[in-house]
Amino acid sequence: MVLKLVGNPLSTCTRRVAIILKEKQVPFEFVLVDFAKGEHKSPEFLKNQPFGQVPYIVEDDGFVVYESRAIGRYIALKYRDQGTPLLPDPTDLKAVALFEQAASIEQANFDFYASTIAWEKIFKAYFGSTTNEEVVKEKLAGLEGKLDAYEVILSKQKYLAGDKLTVADLFHLPYGAVVSAAGFDIFNETKRPNLARWWKDISSRESWQAVKDRADA
Amino acid sequence: MTLKVYGLPQSSATQRVLVVLKEKNVPYELVPVDFFGGELKSLAFLAKSPFGLIPYIDDDGFILCESLAICKYIAAKYAGSGTPLLPDQSDVKAVALFEEACSVEESNFQPIATGIVVEKYFKAFRGLQPDDKVVEECISKLNEKLGGYEAILKKRRFLTGDNMTVADLAHLPTGTIIGDVGVKLLGDPDKRPNVARWWKEISSLPSWLTVVAEAKAA
């Protein structure tokens, strides 16, 4: 029985997991959650994902994991020996620490700003709400500041954790793409050439190209 | 060389690292930074911590930023000392549940609880009035999230199971401040008995109480 990815094809977090599944060449079955019917708030759903969020995965032995980054890490670890290597050498404490630093930078320093911009500019409209431009302006200023630090880091190394690609880089893809598509030139080559180089590298990967529009591709 | 922590005893991110160091019985030196004097914006500081944030550690020349990464590093390096705070690294499923709990803290707890802290703690510090609407929104969101926590903790002593991990401790600093400013959602046994039980257990740890006492004394 194949791994089930339970989510929404357009959801950024569901697509985050799909990228990793593609990189690690792990076949999966996509299971659609009907938000309109409130399926994500049903008791059956909440048994698997107590916060009523997508995505989560179900393994054939019934093992459930939620939180897209935890799922991504789990896939990268379980399928360590196939597809693209996406985690550091577990016996190298410092390499692991630098990877954890990169993963934290993405979740704590990038996602907070990028996901709020994405919510305000794009996703809010789906729920009949209007953009709060003040919030967008504030978060964009915050994001630009963070990306200046990314520029410094990426001027010294190829990827966020060092010279090897890890899940920490790939986790940026969904929100990075949504914010760019919303018209914010955050990966401008002239402004931050190293950030632009890094973004071009990760966003041109086959795995992202395959799922950038839909996670169930 | 004794491990150096660059931060402040009152900084919540620094406190996460300090409680882990104490639980693991790791000797360290806390090097206070001149926060209000703009040290975090200086070139020398940015050379070590490119986002201009505290804490960072210097472990015999190895520089590491991001409190959660630091906590995990210490817990791994000193795995054999003090309280075990990581899952069995050879157990892929246990590691997954640990990362799940860390991510839950980072995405479902931290941003919302920090919203309360900004309004009711930091603003007061600077003589500004809190935005009650924002506070109300944050409390409402946090209540919803804690429903999820209650479901998890009904079946488990700690977030990942029987053993305490970095994922539980990560909640302590921000969780404590929101209680201090009157938002007593974590400790309410009538509303959510299992969250209250878990919160009581981790917030009564001698290591945590020492971190709090040291912050007050500073």
Image: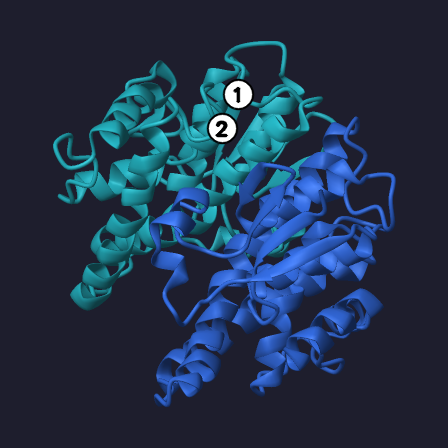
Q: Which residue is mark 2?
A: A167
The residue depicted at 38 percent of the width and 35 percent of the height is A9
Whether residue A44 is visible, yes or no, is: no
Position of residue A158 relative to residue B28, above or below, is: above
Q: Position of residue B7 (x, y in %)?
A: 55, 60
Q: Position of residue B67 (x, y in %)?
A: 58, 51
Other residues around mark 1 within 10 Å, as few (<14) / some (14–19) / many (≥20): many
Mark 1 lies on a secondary structure that is: loop
Please tell me the numbered disc located at residue A86: 1
The residue depicted at 46 percent of the width and 46 percent of the height is A107
Q: Are marks 2 and 1 on the same chain?
A: yes
Chain in cyan in the render: A
Q: In this rendering, would A190 be left or right of A51? A: left
Q: Amino acid at mark 2?
A: Val
- Rendered colour, chain B: blue
Looking at the image, do the residues carrying marks 2 and 1 touch, with CB atoms under 8 Å apart?
Answer: yes
Q: Quadrant of residue A158?
A: top left
Q: Position of residue B109 (x, y in %)?
A: 55, 62
- Judge by depth and name the residue closer to the eye, A212 or B162: B162
Q: Position of residue B189 (x, y in %)?
A: 76, 80
Q: Quadrant of residue A8?
A: top left
Mark 2 lies on a secondary structure that is: helix
Q: Chain of mark 2?
A: A
Q: Chain of mark 1?
A: A
Q: Quadrant of residue B151?
A: bottom right
Quadrant where the N terminus of chain A lies? top right
